[in-house]
Amino acid sequence: MTGGFDSAHPGFGANPWPAYARLRAMSGLPPWQGFHLASRFDDVRAIASDRRMVRGTAIFGPDMRRRMQVAENFHDMPFHERFVQTSMLERDGPDHDRLRRAVFPFFTKSRLESLRLFVTGWVEAALDRLVPQGRFDFIADLAAHLPGQVIGHLIGTDPALAPRITQWSEDTVSYFDVSRRTPARKAQAEDAVRLFHDALQALHAARKARPRDDLMSAMIGAEGAGLLSHDELIATIMQILHAGHGSTIDAMGSGLHALLTHPDQMARLRADPGLMPTAVQEMFRFAPPLVFFHRHASEDLTIAGQDWPKGTRFGLLYASANRDPEAFPEPDRFDVARRPNLHLAFGAGPHVCLGNTLARLNMEVLFSRLLARTRRIEAAGPVAWKTGLQAHGPLSLPITVATH
């Protein structure tokens, strides 16, 4: 048993680390809400990297898949079933690899580096507006807007759509949290996917008529070449927008919170801006935005020292793995110069996060410019945290800044 592990507890979002430590101290992979929880670094990495462990349910056949849908309350959601439950994230093997290849050219380091000027310009303009105020909410006024603008620029969406896309993404992704699957959230998630679909259909039509140098235009070319279907195109773009919004916002919020609660490390980073890449890596290790992902055993297998039958569901706790003392010296210490730092915030194996380079780029630019434009940053009130196990990060983070 999991010893009272309760991710829905009001205090879990702000401080989940003691609960993760208790899980790591347990033997094996303890059961919890239909999953076996992997909380130690080696176990999480082994399961995530093993191709016999799959995200999707196609291997179980249509009858079993339907029973699993109903059991998890993912049924009777036509748009969600069509574009979210069959996205690249929920595909495995050759289909997953095919879809990943279709978008990979837009996520190479060199391609994404070309966005640095755009990101810097957007951040500078935002700081021009916010820094003179002296006080603002880091999440609502700054972090919540940057990822949507950047990923939208990459894909080709209208910048004015960014706030709505962010909300659609939040409404869709939050329904994956097993502790938050209420009827209201189910309806909200389905409606969000429908609105998302309509917006992307309109963009598809516009780019088909007049292509540009953006991801939607490139994907239309791949569709025309028979590399993916139209539904797969819409589902893939939708997933990239989902993944590129909430998780980066959460990482930014947790990253600044780590600096605020470790002023010695903020001072160290100010004194040596060259540490920014390692500091961002440490932000992702110290408080990963995506803390829980699942896998299914596609066959009878042995892993993490035990035998498991086909169909066993595993819950991978990336946040817990990143605080495992067997993998990281002094794991609860935030160190902007930590090396090596081979964390699991972006997952591992076939489903490793496609946008990890873009997330780091956003973070490096944002924190570099914020520190360069200020002499002091301090917390200005209580921090509100997300609850549940799907995502970790502040909902609000009020701060004061000074330039002298």
Image: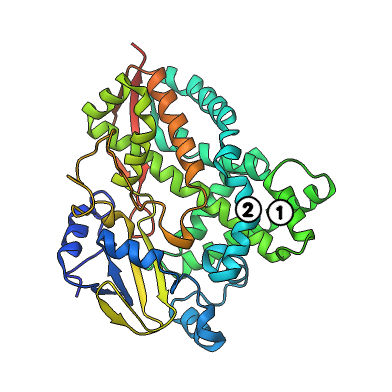
Where residue 293 sits: x, y (%)?
A: 39, 63
Q: Residue at x 57, y 51 (%)?
A: 241
Badge 2: residue crowd in 10 Å (few <14, some 14–19, many ≥20): many
Where residue 279 sits: x, y (%)?
A: 33, 34
Q: Residue at x 37, y 76 (%)?
A: 313
Task: Pick the quarter of the image with the N terminus.
Answer: bottom left
Q: Marks 1/2: CA distance?
A: 7 Å
Figure label count: 2
User: Would you say the residues marked 1 and 2 are in contact, meaning their CB atoms lie under 8 Å apart?
Assistant: yes
The residue closer to the viewer here, 232 or 330, is 330
| Residue type of the residue flagged with mark 2 | Val
Task: Pick the quarter of the image with the C terminus.
Answer: top left
Judging by the rendered image, the residue that carries numbered circle 2 is 103
The residue closer to the viewer here, 162 or 18, is 18
Q: Which quarter of the figure has residue 16?
A: bottom left
Where residue 361 sits: x, y (%)?
A: 48, 36
